[in-house]
Structure formats: structure tokens, C-alpha cells
Image (spheres, coloured by chain):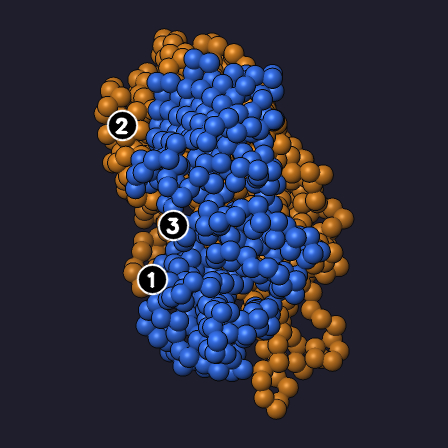
Amino acid sequence: MPAETFAPGIPVEIGKIDRELKKLWAEDGEAKTRASLINLAVYSEAAGSLPKNTQIVSEITEDHACRAIVIAANPAAKENNVEAWINVHCHVSHAGSKQVCSEQLSFLLEGPSARLLPNIVFSQLDSDLPLVLWWQGEFSDPMDPQLWAWVDRVIYDSQTWKEFPIQMERLETAQAEAKQRIVLCDLNWTRLFQIRLAFAQFFDHPSMQKRFDEIDSVEIAFAPGFRSTGLLLAGWLAAQLRWSGAKQTDKNALSFRGRKENEIRIAFAEKEVEPIGRCAMRCGSAQFVVEHAPNADLLDVSAGERACRMPAGKNDMVRLVGEELMRGGPHRVYLRAVNCVRGFL
Amino acid sequence: MSTTAETQQANPLREGLATRTVPQACTVVIFGATGDLTMRKLIPALYNIAADGELPPQVAVIGFARRPKTDEEFRKEQEESTKKFSRQQVRDEIWDGFAQALFYHQSEFHDAAGYKSLAERLEKIDKERGTGGNRLFYLAVAPDQFEAILKNLKDAGLNEPRDGGWARVIVEKPFGTNLASARELNGVVRRAFAENQTYRIDHFLGKETAQNILVLRFANAIFEPIWNGRYVDHIQITAAETLGVEGRAGYYEGAGALRDMVQNHLLQLLCLVAMEPPTDLGADSIRDEKVKIVRSLRRMSAEEIGRNVIRGQYSEGAINGQAVPGYRSEKNVNPESKTETFVALKVRVDDWRLADVPIYIRVGKRLPKSGTEISVHFKKAPAVLFNRESVSLDQNVLVIRIQPDEGISLRMQAKVPGTSFRIEPVKMDFHYGTSFGKASPEAYERLLLDAMSGDATLFARRDEVEEAWAFIDPIEEAWQAKENQPGLFMYPAGSWGPEEADELLARDGRAWRRL
């Protein structure tokens, strides 16, 4: 088998992919195990995405055995061109005794052939396994209903979207037309996982829950370009704590009505920090703070004088997608959070 | 396995964040804090939970033991052992925070004053760390210490939930040496803690595949309809070890394989394999079904024990090409010891599902290979077509591997490619380690989290333990009888046990599965 590089692998004719894959396995003398739990299709229209996504897939497969179908598309190209490659990513299993390998099929679709996406994806799926589609960038209109009818989970990153409402509407329309449950997995929401966990644990003890009604302000510091992440965090608090009446009070602040009709102000500040560098919640005299120092992989979590550290998780695609693949499940809470701040995203 | 509904209702911010019950802030008091279990398993498990971000930051740990030691010395010792035994690398920045929550409390187990000062310390920790009066007492000591500890906890009022919090006790095996002593121990525990405060640990149940048995059986519609005497020929449960007694001779001489492994771990596995679907995933619903199985185990007369239970002891031999001594030559073992290091049993469960399905259990030390697994052997296809007398086919076998290399495999028949019509067994094999890259948490991590969450599903209930002893006791009694005592068969280390164990199956026209 080829040495692991971030080139997409051995060039093959599309019609001979299966045969070439078999050959690839047969030629290798070493004992290796092919493993696959999902079909992971990665779609990008960004220039140079193929080697970058090959590297990401290689790292994802360390923890998530899959058949990866990596597609680089350039629908705007004048020339019609289709190319394909095959590759395998092998890693020693955690038990340390086996080489576990995942297959990657890569496609370059240029010009009108970019419309072949559903056709290509369908024909290369590992049967009976769920299809996770990771769509990088913006969704274009119209979205191909053929494709969406087959997708079980769609991964996207709303942080990169220019127009959140338009993109979300396209996604929701595709979801409705698909007539099957597609789970929406927003990596911008996944970024908040550890911060949400850190906040939630403050209120685990029943005696702490009366504090919810004492919340009067929240401050969220976000990195340039991550305002939407901060808004989603605010949306989560509002949705879960049943705040209502969202209003933009100024450019950098929202206000909500709490359950006891009290006003809750959420202030946003852009700083050179991690996506969410700090979130502080004031409840009367008490303050709950979660801070993420730049480049740190631990959060500093404090409630008054009590402080501890919790995992922060890196803001990189491998970690975020891996987290999504590991957790699964529906995203009701995400949709509620989106709906609370949809008008401001 | 309880749902998270209760916690979610209490804390709306938890919704969607966890698919398990949320552990609550508490102080964990470990009795026997300088012992092996604490150093090798408990503190490393708590550290790993903290490193994964699942340990509530308020959690404090108090090590309670006899030797004089400062908090700092205790922290230093635990740091060294955690670095040695933790499944993930110890990171200074996480350890430093974790270590600040480690305290040492020096006292004799029977000294009432030590518990009074413990109570004061717990109150102080409650105030300082916000543990809300929740206390988890872990008895990592020999059972002969239980009574003194539990009585003193009660006298100091530490057994009572206070300030809306809870008090729980985790009890390590061995839980008794027979039914009478188990009842006595249960009585001792019950005098201080109610059953719903008591968590009897069996670390086998914390293993990923043991938990997966219920998922395999009840989340896959294809297995349940054939999981009965109509389709299942027999079941085998094997727990094999290459190791000998390894410094545990003092304990093992008095216990033997039957008490050490069968009464607890293997009967727990048997319950998971044989039980009916529970009404829900609540701890008591699952344990209700498990206890029915232990109750349904057919009791054996002395004569039946002689026929259906084979005990063995290893003599000198070789493991992996290395010569090893016989059991009687091991350090601290009586040279005339009659302690069994191997047991094979044929048991019957008298219920509708498996009434006609024999279950063969074997456990042994110094066997050629280590491994714990359950294999369900299905009946052969009808003796027509491919299964005529001349080409009798193998059975379909579903194997659930508990350790090592956790996974599930299914053996079936397939045609060998070619012009001839040759049929050979093939194996569909699922390995956790291959399919799921992430390493599973250690059993103790899962069980400690469960105890902090108040989820007792993976802990043995009093009646389970007592019913298991009620099944085991007649076997031990027959072995100790003055007359007609069943033999103790010797087997060379590195073999698969005495020949008599093979005959146990051979007379039913069966054979042990090759591991």
C-alpha cells in the first residue's frame, strides 16, 4: 500500500474503483484490518481542498473507522473534468496489536460534472452504513433533493456562513423535502460543547437551581469572526432557561426577559482570544466564569473562590468533526438555541 | 443505565450534554487508602474521570487509613502510583487541581474518635468545596474490617443523608465466603446503610462488553426470537488466566476458584445472558430479572455435584514456554492444599427460556491463554441438504468476548469458492478496538461515576449475592464432606484443565470452545 501522504492516493478510473480497491488490498502482504462504521462524504468547493481534506480524514480515521468519500468540486470551471483516486489510512489500534485501515475515495469534479455529486456518492457507499455528509462552506440553491434523501447526518460550520438565515432556510427546506430525519450537526455548536458542560456543572446541585432566577447579566468574549458562536451560546442559555423577548439593545448587547420578568442583559465583546474566550454569568452577588486562555486545552472554571480546570477541546476540524461523530443523537437543543437568536445571527 | 431525565429536569443546562446520569458533587471517603486497590485502581480512575471533565469539580477524596501521613505525603504517593497505573498520561496541570482535593485522615478503623474527627472534616469540606453533604464511602478493605467501619460510621451519624444530600457505601468483594457469612455481612451493612444506599461492586459488570450484552440481546430484533431452548443448543462461559496466584495465596487458599470467580463474576455474566427483558432500564428492573435467574439455577444433590462439577488444581508445567511451579509449590500455599484453581460446571436454569439448555462454566488459573468470553452455541441445521450425516456441519456460534480484545463474533457456514461443494465455517468478527478508536474507560471509572450518580444497575443487590451463595454453598459443602468427596483433579500448568472437564462435555456430545 502507498506510504501515507496527504496526496489523494492512486489515480483510478471511476468505473474501476471497486476493482482497484480490491487490488490495493490484495497486493499488500501485511496483516491489516479494514474497518468502517459510517460513510463519511466530505464536499468542498474551496481551491486546494483535496490534500487538506485528505489530511483531516487521515486523522479522523484514527478514532472513527469509515469509508471516506472526499469530493473537491469546481462547478464554475469551464472545462468538464472528472478524476478519481483511492487511498487507505492505516493506524495501529489502541489495543496496539492491529493495523486498522479505512478507505478513502477522492473525486475532483469540474464544470457541469459537479452535478454528478449524488450519483458519485450513491455508487460508492458502503452498504447498510449511515451516510454522514460534511458540507464545507455555503449551501448553494437549489439543493439536490436526490442527495438529501440519502443523508443521515449533515455536518456544516455556520461560523463560515455569510448569511445565516438564508443558509439555515436552505438547510431546513432540504431537510423537510428529504422526508426523512436528517440530523443537523453544526460545528459552530460543537465548539461550545465544553463551555456548555462547564456552565452546566455549576448548577447540578439542586440547591444551585434557584440561582437561575437571579441571573441578571452575561458577558461573552469571542474571537474575531466568531460572533455567531457567541450568539449561539446566548441562544442556548435563553432557550434552556426559558428566557423570552429577545431584543437588541445596542450593537454589542441583547436583552431577554427572565422567567420572573426580570431583565437579563447579554453583552458581547470581540477580543483576540479562542472562539469563546470568556463567558461570565452574574447571579446577584455570585459570579460564574468560564475562561479559555489562548491556545490552552483546559478551561479555567470558577464559581466565586472555587476554581478548577476542565478540558477545553481544540478548535480544529479533526476534533470538532470527531466530537460530532462520537456523540450522535438528535440536536433538539441546538435548534431551540438557534430559534432564540435566529434574528441576530 | 438509568435515564438522565431526573437530572435534566433539575438542571436544564444538562439537556443534550450527556447520555448518562450526571455524577453529583460529593466527598469520596476511601477506607484502606494505602492499599493496592486504592493506588492501582481507585485514585487513577478518579483522576481519569477528572481529566475527561466528567468529575464534578467540587468532588473531594479523603483517604482513611491507619498509617500516620500528612495530606501532602498522601498526595505525593498517589501521584506516583497514578502516573504508573493511569490509562492516560498524568498531566501536571490537571493533577495539581485534582490533588488539592485529596486529603488523608489517619485513624484505626475501630477508633470512634477517628470517625468523629472525620465527620468534622467532612463538614468542613462541604462548606469549603460545596459537596452538599453528599458522601460516598468506599470500603477497600478486607471484609473482617467492615463491621468496625460501618458501626463507627453509624455511631458518628455519617450513614444518614443530611442537608438534602446522600450517603452511600461501596462494598468490595469478596462479599462473604458462604451464604451464612454473606447474610451476616449484609446484616452488618444493613444496620448502617439501607439497601438503596449500598453498592456492591463487581468490576466485571463495569466492562464495556458486559454492558453490551443487554444491548446485543434487546436492541437487535434478530437475536431475541432465537434466544431460547428451541434454537440454542448450549452456552459456555469461560474465564481463563495464564497467571497463577501472584501473591494472593493468603486469600486464594481460603477462597478457591469457585468462590473467587464463579459466585460473583461468572454468575453475573450468566444472568445477563439468560435474563428476560426488563420492564425498563432502571437499576431494580434489571436486577429483578437477574435475581430470577440466580433463583432458577437448579440446585444439585451431592451426587449431581460429583457428576456436574469438576475441580482441578495446577501442577508444574509451562506457560508461554516458561516453566512454572505447581500450585502447591507457590509461596504461602499449603503443600497439601486442596484449594481448586480450576472449576468446570454444568448448570441448568429452570425457566421457560433456557430450561433445556445446559450452561457450561469453566474458570481456571495457569491455562494456556487468558480470556473471558460467553459463547452461545446454536442447534445444527436439519440433517438434510448440506447437513447430511456424511458432511455434518458445525454449529453457529455467537461469541461475546469480555476480555481482552472486547468484541462479538458469529460463526456460520459458507461455501468454499470452487467447483466442488465444500462448506467451511467462517467468522464475522466485530472488535471494539478496531471499530471504535477511542479507548474504553476502565471498569472502575464507570462504576465510580455510577455510584456518584446514584445508578445501581451495575452493582449487585443483596438478594443476588445471597441467592448466588445459596447455589454455591452445596458445592463447597460436598467438597468438604468427609465421605464421598468428589475428587480434586490435577492438571499441568499450561493445559486446558483436567481431562475430567473435557469429559463433562464429551458425555453430552459436546466440547469446550477453543479460545
- The answer to which quarter of the image holds residue A98 is bottom left
- Name the residue nearer the viewer: B214 or B307: B214
Q: Please determine if labels 1 and 2 lie on a single subunit.
A: yes
Q: Which chain is blue?
A: A
Q: Which amino acid is tagged 1?
A: Asn
Mark seen at residue B75: 2
Q: Which amino acid is tagged 2?
A: Arg
Q: Which residue is mark 1?
A: B320
Chain bearing mark 2: B
- Number of marks in the image? 3
Q: Which chain is orange?
A: B
Q: Who's the residue at 30% across and 24% down the image?
A: B100
Q: Which amino acid is tagged 3?
A: Asp
Residue A180 place in picture, x, y as percent: 69, 55
Q: Earlier in the sequence, mark 1 or mark 2?
A: 2
Closer to the eye: label 1 or 2: 2
User: Is residue A269 placed above or below B58 in the rendered structure?
Assistant: below
Q: Are marks 1 and 3 in contact (CB under 8 Å)?
A: no
Residue A216 place in picture, x, y as percent: 49, 18
Residue B501 place in picture, x, y as percent: 53, 58
- How packed mark 2 is, by other alpha carbons closer than 10 Å (few <14, some 14-19, many 20 or more), is many
Q: Is residue A305 left or right of residue B281?
A: left
Q: Are marks 3 and 2 in contact (CB under 8 Å)?
A: no
Alpha-carbon distance for marks 3 and 2?
35 Å
User: Is residue A332 placed above or below A96 in the rendered structure?
Assistant: above
Chain bearing mark 1: B
Q: Who's the residue at 70% across and 77% down the image?
A: B387
